[in-house]
Amino acid sequence: MKVVVQRSKAAKVTVNGEVIGQITSGFVLLVGVTHDDKEEDCAYLADKIANLRVFEDENGKMNRSLLDVGGQILSVSQFTLYGDCRKGRRPSFIEAARPEHAIQLYERFNQLLREKGIHVETGVFGAMMDVELINDGPVTLIIESKDE
């Protein structure tokens, strides 16, 4: 699995003009799943993201986690994270998991975050979505469950 983590001051996802998910301070997550991902990948990433120390402490150092600051998550499925642009001009998505596999892991990942006490909002899996955010910092990281 691959997740783009963006620290944000506010974010929302809209489908067909309707706000589906919205958060205040926390993370916007773009979540991609590949073929051989398993529940262990979900658990690893949920723990890593919940405890990632990228929020400022009283000294202005990135030393506090999402759990420490009571942040929220807007999680958006993003199969294009597995797009391969090395050949030609059009990305190949052969490394992206089939939807029936990806949705199960995406939903499990979000559930594991909720079990940690984090408020999680989501988009609609497989839909065309508009994602708006105010990137705080900006702080943007890419976290993967496997070495590539």
Image: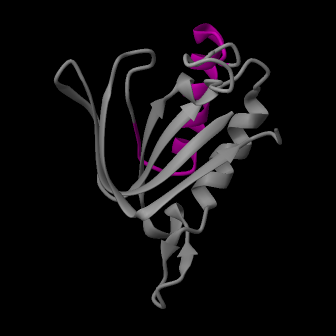
Tell me if residue 43 comes above or below residue 124 in the rendering: below
Q: Nearer the viewer, residue 123 or 90?
A: 90
Q: Position of residue 134 (x, y in %)?
A: 30, 55
Q: Quadrant of residue 83?
A: top right
Q: Position of residue 144 (x, y in %)?
A: 71, 42
Q: Does the magenta run of residues contain 99?
A: yes
Q: Residue furthest left?
A: 17
Give the quadrant of the C terminus.
top right
Q: Residue furthest front?
A: 88
Q: Position of residue 28 (x, y in %)?
A: 43, 46
Q: Quadrant of residue 135?
A: bottom left
Residue at image location 58% in from the left, 10% down from the top: 99
Tell me if residue 104 comes above or below residue 54 in the rendering: above
Give the quadrant of the N terminus.
top right
From the viewer's perspective, tell me whether residue 148 is left or right of residue 6. Answer: right
Residue at image location 42% in from the left, 62% down from the top: 138
Tell me if residue 20 comes above or below residue 127 in the rendering: below
From the viewer's perspective, tell me whether residue 10 is left or right of residue 30. Answer: left
Residue at image location 78% in from the left, 35% down from the top: 40
Q: Over which residues does the magenta segment extend?
A: 96-121
Q: Is residue 139 visible?
A: yes
**Colour mode of the rendering:** one colour
Q: Position of residue 93 (x, y in %)?
A: 62, 16
Q: How many marks?
A: 0
Q: Does the magenta run of residues contain 107?
A: yes
Q: Is residue 22 visible?
A: no
Q: Main secondary structure of the magenta part?
A: helix
Tell me if residue 135 comes above or below residue 54 in the rendering: above
Q: Residue furthest bottom?
A: 59
